[in-house]
């Protein structure tokens, strides 16, 4: 019998208790149900879109490095149909990041198509994205070598060594494939990924991808430091880390991990860290300057 049905036959005291206590709970359940239904409707609206499955397939192909030309054709069609500017930019940035930049030919072609479809005011958007390293044009090895040779003649030998390191870093900057392989960002599971029985942090992206920031935290916790992750740090454009002698650690069940995100983090990263915490018996405290997503990030580049 439901709480609402039990109201029949109540005396005044019981009715007062029902109104002050149990009815309050019913109202809360009703509010949560409305919220859940609203979320389901929003998800289904996106999921039943004409090109949703094709978009998902393209994103997975880009992450794994398959059918790149076919993916570019889909992006061109996306732009031609004038799907929202943000969505087209998002998948363009994913292509650029996973392929370590676009070839000069593809960059010029896709940029021209985008500007023709959405307007020349987005020239500044492309400039901002290029500056941030989100949508870039590949620089050939010959071009980098020529630049390095010219600049090296203008500086001292000591400075030339530093410039050489900088150019080497530039050549491999944002090397998604190497980082992905080294950290196992793309799970190699067999069969369909069961979201009801989560196996790893990739469940936040339907088993397709583990958030990079969360994977790095997992590796640091496993290794009890950065030892062995120096190459990953270099590939990310960061620095090597040296840790001091470790003090005795409390049992894992007592550990509290403080994760700090400068610039913002996504709900996916929060969910992935919660999963990691449950699996390892850890408690994560997350500090971030903002909760963001791809749309908010790209919108900010249009306003810069």
Image (cartoon, grey):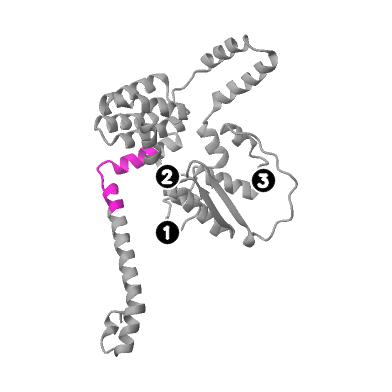
Q: Is residue 30 visible?
A: yes
Element type where label 2 sits in the image: loop
The front one of 31 and 240 is 31
Percent x, y for residue 295?
Answer: 36, 40
Residue corresponding to mark 3? 225
Residue corresponding to mark 1? 196
Question: Can you tell which mark lies on residue 297?
Answer: none
Question: Is 63 rendered above or below residue 266?
Answer: above
Question: Can you tell which mark lies on residue 292?
Answer: 2
Horizontally, residue 161 falls left or right of residue 10, namely right
Spatial distance from mark 1 to mark 3, Cα to Cα?
32 Å
Which range of residues does the magenta coloring cover? Answer: 42-59
Pointer 1: residues within 10 angstroms few (<14), some, or many (20+)?
Answer: few
Kindly indicate the quadrant of the structure image that contains residue 118. top left
Query: Does the magenta-highlighted stretch encompass residue 127?
Result: no
Percent x, y for residue 158?
Answer: 70, 17
Pointer 2 or 3: first along the chain: 3
Question: Is 159 rendered above or below residue 9?
Answer: above
Pointer 3: residues within 10 angstroms few (<14), some, or many (20+)?
Answer: some
Locate the N terminus and report the quarter of the image it occupies. bottom left
Spatial distance from mark 1 to mark 2, Cα to Cα?
26 Å
**Magenta highlight: main SS:** helix
């Amino acid at each position: 019998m439901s709480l609402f049905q039990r109201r029949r036959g109540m005396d005044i005291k019981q009715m007062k208790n029902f109104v002050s206590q149990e009815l309050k709970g019913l109202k809360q359940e009703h509010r949560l149900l409305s919220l859940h239904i609203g979320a389901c409707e929003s998800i289904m609206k996106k999921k039943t879109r004409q090109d949703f499955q094709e978009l998902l397939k393209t994103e997975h192909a880009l992450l794994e490095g398959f059918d790149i030309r076919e993916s570019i054709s889909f992006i061109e069609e996306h732009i031609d149909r004038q799907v929202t500017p943000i969505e087209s930019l998002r998948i363009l940035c994913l292509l650029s990041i996973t392929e370590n930049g676009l070839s000069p030919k593809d960059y010029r072609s896709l940029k021209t198509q985008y500007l023709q479809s959405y307007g020349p005011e987005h020239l500044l958007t492309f400039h901002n994205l290029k500056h941030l390293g989100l949508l870039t044009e590949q620089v050939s090895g010959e071009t980098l070598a020529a630049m390095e040779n010219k600049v090296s003649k203008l500086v001292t030998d000591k400075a030339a060594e530093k410039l050489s390191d900088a150019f080497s870093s530039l050549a491999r900057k944002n090397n998604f494939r190497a980082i992905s392989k080294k950290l196992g960002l793309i799970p190699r599971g067999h069969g369909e990924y069961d979201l009801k029985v989560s196996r790893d942090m990739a469940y936040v992206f339907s088993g397709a991808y583990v958030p990079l920031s969360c994977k790095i935290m997992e590796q640091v916790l496993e290794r009890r430091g950065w030892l062995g992750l120096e190459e990953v740090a270099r590939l990310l454009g960061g620095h090597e880390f040296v840790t001091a002698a470790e003090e005795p650690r409390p049992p894992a069940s007592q550990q509290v991990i403080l994760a700090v995100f400068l610039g913002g983090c996504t709900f996916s990263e929060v969910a992935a860290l919660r999963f990691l915490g449950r699996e390892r018996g850890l408690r994560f405290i997350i500090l971030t300057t903002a909760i963001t997503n791809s749309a908010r990030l790209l919108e900010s580049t249009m306003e810069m």
